[in-house]
Image: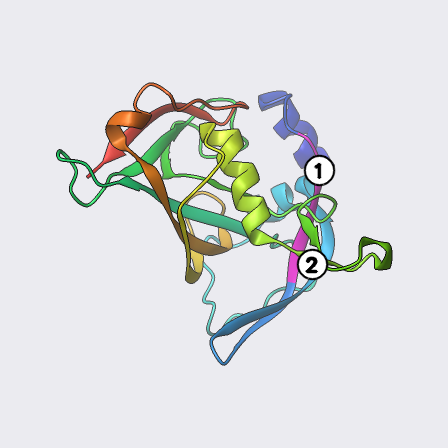
Amino acid sequence: DENWRQELIKNPNMFAGPMASIKYFEVKNGVLCFSLRRTRFDTYSYFRRAGPGELNLKKDPLDKDGSRPVSMGSVTVTAPSQAFPSGAIIVGKRSQNAAFGQGKASTLPSGYFNPDVDRMVVGDSAKERSFVSIRLTTIKEMVEETGIEDYETFNYLGLINDSVLSKQPLIAMRLGLAFTKEELEGTLKDMGVEVGEFSFVS
């Protein structure tokens, strides 16, 4: 509680919203399988500060008493153009209002799975059968951080450990856009308070 009070002094816009913590994971025949339990951003904020900066995904078990929420990090690549024949990677500089990593550059979009929102209903909605949707999380974060609402290609890259910003395991992916760097320049906009400025990397 004291940790969260101190965080709110630094950034009163932060919200102790719902998250889903990874309780256990394994890869079966190339498919990432994991079980989840509920957590909150204030709990994660504490464990992020108190926990180790490094995590060996092959050796270290996930601490059942910790908070390692499901998150995703993307590399978004523009369509090819004459100046950028292989496309350009969109990079955002995190604003001073971001929850962490203020002033640092990162690829976009990135964010956390919200167990109350980021689900998709499959089949008859009356049966209330819903599934976790990392794609839904990705689209939501892309709209919030860039204003872009669509992508042309979507590829999972793997499960990695981000030891710099989120300090936790995250699902990495690559998004390909139908727009060139020249078409996007000047049109990207942060819908919230996380990204201060945008740039493009060849």
Q: Which residue is mark 1?
A: 17
Circle 1 Cα neighbour tier, 10 Å, few/some/many (<14 / 14–19 / ≥20): few
Q: Residue at the location (43% across, 63% down)?
A: 158
What is the C-alpha distance between the residues marked 2 and 1?
A: 20 Å
Return the disc, 2 or 1, that comes first in the chain's sequence.
Answer: 1
Q: Is residue 16 magenta?
A: yes
Q: Position of residue 175 (x, y in %)?
A: 39, 47
Q: Which residue is mark 2?
A: 131
Q: Is residue 89 left or right of residue 158?
A: left
Q: Which quadrant holds the C terminus?
A: top left
Q: In terms of secondary structure, what is the magenta stretch mainly?
A: strand
Magenta-drawn segment: 15-22
Q: Is residue 1 left or right of residue 63?
A: right
Instruction: Provide the secondary structure element on which disc 2 rests.
Output: strand
Q: Residue at the location (58% across, 45% down)?
A: 137
Q: Nearer the viewer, residue 28 or 182?
A: 182
Number of numbered discs on residues: 2
What's the residue type where badge 1 is placed?
Gly
Q: Position of residue 49 (x, y in %)?
A: 56, 44
Q: Position of residue 190 (x, y in %)?
A: 47, 24
Q: Is residue 63 magenta?
A: no
Q: Residue at the location (15% across, 42% down)?
A: 85
Q: Nearer the viewer, residue 34 or 1?
A: 34
